[in-house]
Amino acid sequence: MSRGFTHARLACGCRVVFRDAPEGRPYTIVVDEKSAGCPSPLHVRDLPLYDYREALRPPTRYLPSEEEGFEEES
């Protein structure tokens, strides 16, 4: 585990645990207890939480380089 953390409590009141993950990732975050007052439908007990924000993930494919010297004909 990273720095000895085993669990944490989210602002909504849900409790999450950190587990070792496959595929070369350091750990997986799993909802251990869902809070009764949690408004998020994504927090489901015993299911992992995933980060879907594209800005924080590395690109999965490379963009083609721009061609230089291209001019439109009119």
Image: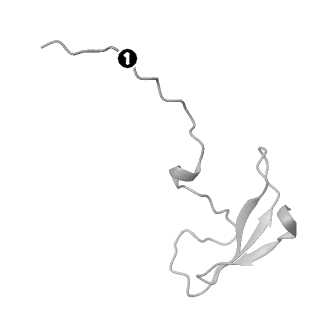
Above or below residue 20? Residue 18 is below
Residue corresponding to mark 1: 68
Image location (x, y in percent) of residue 61: 55, 32
Image location (x, y in percent) of residue 2: 83, 62
**How many other residues sit within 10 Å of disc 1, few (<14), some (14-19) or many (≥20)?**
few
Image location (x, y in percent) of residue 16: 72, 73
Q: Residue at x 39, y 18 (%)?
A: 67
As rendered, which of 25 and 33 lies closer to the eye?
Answer: 25
As rendered, which of 74 and 42 lies closer to the eye?
Answer: 74
* Labels in figure, total: 1
Q: Looking at numbered disc 1 in the image, what kind of residue is underneath it? A: Glu
Q: Residue at x 54, y 55 (%)?
A: 52
Q: Residue at x 57, y 52 (%)?
A: 56
As rendered, which of 37 and 12 lies closer to the eye?
Answer: 12
Name the image quarter holding the C terminus: top left
Query: Residue 28 vs residue 52: left or right?
Result: right
Above or below residue 55? Residue 3 is below
Q: Residue furthest left?
A: 74
